[in-house]
Image (cartoon, coloured by chain):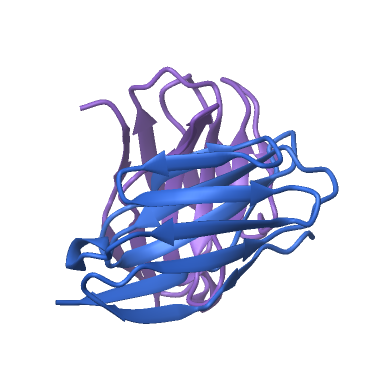
Amino acid sequence: NAGVTQTPKFQVLKTGQSMTLQCAQDMNHNSMYWYRQDPGMGLRLIYYSASEGTTDKGEVPNGYNVSRLNKREFSLRLESAAPSQTSVYFCANSDSYGYTFGSGTRLTVV
Amino acid sequence: ILNVEQSPQSLHVQEGDSTNFTCSFPSSNFYALHWYRWETAKSPEALFVMTLNGDEKKKGRISATLNTKEGYSYLYIKGSQPEDSATYLCASFTGGFKTIFGAGTRLFVKA
């Protein structure tokens, strides 16, 4: 099925550890995004990529890096995890019909 | 940062009730208003993308209206069913890659 696939679904990290969240699409869209969802708040944009090879900061980029090596994949890296990064992370792409989201990654930093 | 406000935060209704909720957004720099349905343990799914003042969209028992001049959109569900239980998100797209999401309205439909 066409869509956005992200891994892993769940992850527990210790403070200071690093990890990469992987995201891949098979919809051939140029734009891809990483959002975080925290209780009582709307989805907040971490980084986005308008096209292959380009990335830009969103609303809450501190503590994160991204990589868009090809049109299909857009990864999010936490270099040194902090408890404030405990959240649910969503990868997404978009077209004129709106966003298509991945299934989410629930990350806990202890 | 532009704010998108949704009300109420949560809503409990009985099966068969009709219901509606509100999304308020800044009317300046408006490009589009999105509605999403988000079931627990799943990802948000697009319901409507609305661009024109006075737009009305319908999908089955769910419909939405848009007022860009005053900055609000209503989502209506006619004859709510338990399977309608979900969080309904709205988002204001202001151009470029700037989309601001509301916190959602959580709907509970009791059988």
Q: Dividing the image into 4 quarters, which one contains the C terminus of chain A? A: bottom left
Residue occupying image coordinates x 73% and y 64%: B3
Q: Is residue A108 visible?
A: yes
The shade of chain B is blue
In the displayed structure, would residue A47 be above or below residue A109?
A: above
Question: From where the camera sits, is residue A79 visible?
Answer: no
With B18 as the anchor, is A53 left or right in this view? right
The quarter holding residue A9 reads bottom left
Establish if B45 lies above or below A4.
below
**Which residue is drawn at the image coordinates 38% and 38% (left, top)?**
A23
Image quarter of residue B54: top right
Q: Position of residue A106 (x, y in %)?
A: 34, 64
Which image quarter holds the N terminus of chain A?
Answer: top left
Q: Please, which residue is most extreme toward the right here?
A: B28
Q: In this view, does A80 lie to the left or right of A88?
A: right
Total marks placed: 0
Relative to the observer, which residue lies in front, A15 or A27? A27
Q: Where is residue A33 in the image (x, y as percent from the top left)?
A: 54, 40
Q: Position of residue B12 (x, y in %)?
A: 34, 82
Determine whether A62 is above or below B51 in the image. below
Chain A drawn in what color? purple
Query: Which residue is located at x 65 percent, y 33 percent?
Result: A55
Farthest residue to the left: give it. B111
x and y percentages locating residue A25 in the rendered image: 36, 28
Residue depicted at x 34% and y 60%:
B78
Toward the viewer: B50 or B58?
Answer: B58
